Image (cartoon, grey):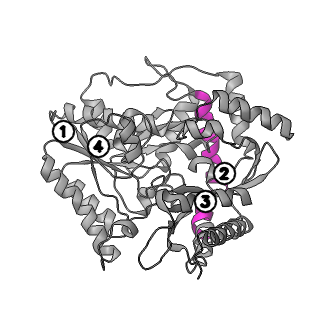
Amino acid sequence: MNSSADTASLKALDRAHHLHPFTDFHDYAKGNGRIFSRAEGVFIYDSDGNRMLDGMSGLWCCNLGYSQDRIKQAVFDQMQQLPYYNNFFNCSNQPAVELAAALTKIAPPGFDHVFFTNSGSEANDTNIRMVHRYYDLLDKPEKKLIISRKNAYHGSTIAAASLGGMKAMHEQAIGLDYVHHVNQPHWFELAEPGEDEASFGLRIARELESRIDELGEHRVAAFIAEPVQGAGGVIVPPDSYWPELQRICDERDILLIADEVICGFGRTGQWWGSQTYNIKPDLITFAKAVTNGYMPLGGVLVSDKVADVLMAKGGEFAHGLTYSGHPASCAAGLATLDILHEENIVGHAAEHLAPYFQNSLEGLRDHPIVGQIRGRGCFAAIELVADKETRERLAPDSAGAVFCRDTANNLGLMVRQTGDAMIMSPPLICEDEHIDYLVEKLTAALDATAEHYKISG
């Protein structure tokens, strides 16, 4: 549908009846949202026919873009054969069985079991249940506390939002009292004057050790973190950070949960962000790109260390979801993995796309409102400032980055704003010309933003 009349009717219905995620309902009811009607390759089209390069891969999930007929056909075929059955009560289905096995083949060594959910949020809820069950079975019932990071995003259920560290979410929901937080490894925002990135990484990592001492090692069960914080603003940790965190968890009998919902399936340059940073997790959260975003699916990769205890000690694991291991979603996952393997998507992204993308962004470093460019693999963030030396922001409440985002969107580029940063994660199937287009439109948006706020080079 492309007629303005149809678009107007849809927008009116949308404002009247549809409550959107992470949206100011009052403002949206008066606003003029965008209705997307189709997609092709790495481009999305709104109902007025405007084309946009999807620089966010949907919500970090459509790594293979929108024209993967093989995935669509796999879902269709599965719906004809077995559209649904549950995995409770000793039941299973072929796609769930085969996908679980396929995921263990690409998992880091020592991961031979999978628990399926519908989303990353539910997978992180599952992690809490598994961690508590694990220590109960080891006769350590006091180990219930979980430590996370400020500004982390681990999902939107009450439990997952509690694990996350976003202030706005905590202000609107009662957090679980057994979740605690330490600082994020955001050097640009939190470094002390003159502190280099390596020293900063060690200092922030050691906050975990101090918090464990404060709470009591006998009470702390796990630490959860994304290898690179995605929704928090593509916070790329210093190289000194993860080795120190790994040491602390290993020495203190603390389970390490790697939330790979965004980093997994090639985004950082390897199958898993854990491999990129040489992290040795005990549980790995996955979702999003496992089906290329075409069907809802998430889950937990469970290490042998944890699974052996859960299985050997016996007793029911009293947790599950109606759609855990949904056959159509798992069929989509299998087709997605086949494409990733057969077309060497992860290898090509690491060897060519990621370097081309990161090098292309480097040309923006001298732009008058660019304070920092940070990235790893195929995602990145550009921090906006009014003054490079003082790091003064363009406007209160991140209004400068919102202006830049809206400008980029209107120019035909879908990127997001988090705080004062522009963030992006283009599909892993992008060609050089798509990256050139992204940088061209982003540059134009930065130029317009600088002009709007009267900042000159």
**Dot in front, 4 or 1:** 1
The disc, 4 or 3, on the residue closer to the chain's N-terminal end is 4
Amino acid type shown at disc 1: Lys
Q: Is residue 429 among the parts visible in the rendering?
A: no
Q: Position of residue 203 (x, y in %)?
A: 25, 67
Q: Which residue is mark 3?
A: 403
Disc 2, disc 1: CB below 8 Å? no
Q: Which residue is mark 4?
A: 305
The disc, 3 or 1, on the residue closer to the chain's N-terminal end is 1
**Dot in front, 2 or 4:** 2
The mark tally for this picture is 4
Quarter occupied by the C terminus = bottom right
Q: Is residue 185 left or right of residue 43?
A: left
Give the spatial CA distance, label 2 vs label 4. 33 Å
Q: Nearer the viewer, residue 343 or 387?
A: 387
Q: Is residue 24 left or right of residue 281?
A: right
Q: Which residues are magenta?
A: 327-352
Disc 2, disc 4: CB below 8 Å? no
The disc, 2 or 1, on the residue closer to the chain's N-terminal end is 2
Amino acid type shown at disc 2: Leu
Give the spatial CA distance, label 3 vs label 1. 46 Å
Q: Give the residue at x 18% y 38%.
A: 143
**Dot in front, 4 or 3:** 3
Vertical order, 4 against 279 (above or below): above
SS for dot 3: helix
The disc, 3 or 2, on the residue closer to the chain's N-terminal end is 2
Residue 231 colored in magenta in the image: no
**Dot in front, 3 or 2:** 3
Give the spatial CA distance, label 4 vs label 3. 48 Å
Q: Which residue is mark 1?
A: 143
Q: Which residue is mark 2?
A: 64
Q: Give the residue at x 61% y 78%.
A: 363
